[in-house]
Image (spheres, rainbow, N blue to C red):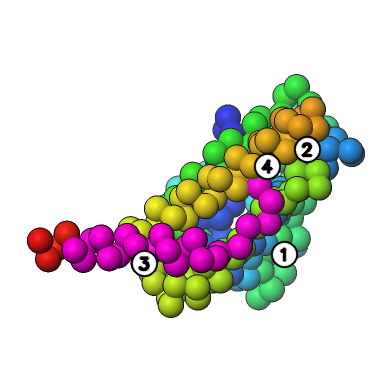
Amino acid sequence: MRELSLHVLDLLQNSLEAGATRLDVSIEEDLTADRLTIEVRDNGRGMSAETARQALNPFFTTRTTRHVGLGLPLLAAAAERCEGDLAVDSQPGSGTVVSAAFHHSHIDRAPLGNMAGTLLAFLLGGDDRPLRLGYRHRVGDEAFEFDSAAIEAEVGGLPLSYPPLRDWLRDFIAEGEASLAVAGRATGTEGRGAGTGHEPSHALHSAVGQKGENDAKAQES
């Protein structure tokens, strides 16, 4: 895969297939140590140590919809090309944690890519089960984070697919990612990610409320 964000999306989809309802994505760009770490944690079914070991085999899969599972082996290979590694920590009934580490400035490291698009696609493209996604991205001393449950609570439980909320969420994540990219460039290293600890606020209520009022007026006319 050309972008690491696609690996993240693959891990999130794996978590859904494992029955997860709570997922947390953490991206840490330690510019001092020149290290990038991506972690995806879920509360899914988990797996035994033997299954976790076999999951790194490209010819092993627990899925019935395809014959070969390439997600984890491809991510492991991407990390190893950059003097990094991949770890899978899982137990049956206790969820799974997948962590991939990379030499940040390594010439062979793929760019992080469009995390805003990846997260939005995941949040809007899932099934009907209740899902909670937490996201935290740090570049040096700057960080951007959000919790989908907190956002939904701020707007009275409206679904994230509600058009005004969807539009706000797209802009919110994109702006957070863009501000971290600026932070990374300011330190002399490309920050391929997010912004500085934004939280849902009055801007969210204003955007959703104003758009809803405009839609209602349009329908009346």
Verify CB contact (< 8 Å) between mark 3 and mark 2: no
Q: CA distance from mark 1 to mark 2?
A: 21 Å
Q: Residues within 10 Å of mark 1 (few under 14, many from 20)?
A: many
Amino acid at pointer 3: Gly
Residue that badge 4 annotates: 180
Residue that badge 1 annotates: 90
Verify CB contact (< 8 Å) between mark 4 and mark 2: no
The kind of secondary structure element at disc 4 is: helix
Q: Position of residue 9 (x, y in %)?
A: 54, 48
Q: CA distance from mark 1 to mark 3?
A: 43 Å
The range drawn in magenta is 195-217
Verify CB contact (< 8 Å) between mark 1 and mark 4: no
Residue at left offset 72%, top offset 24%: 108
Q: How many marks?
A: 4
Q: Residues within 10 Å of mark 4 (few under 14, many from 20)?
A: many
Instruction: Look at the image and tell me whether residue 127 can be seen.
Output: no
Q: CA distance from mark 1 to mark 4?
A: 31 Å
Mark 4 and mark 2 lie on one chain; the one further toward the N terminus is: 2
Mark 1 and mark 4 lie on one chain; the one further toward the N terminus is: 1
Verify CB contact (< 8 Å) between mark 1 and mark 3: no
Residue at left offset 39%, top offset 72%: 158
Q: Which mark is residue 102?
A: 2
Mark 1 and mark 3 lie on one chain; the one further toward the N terminus is: 1
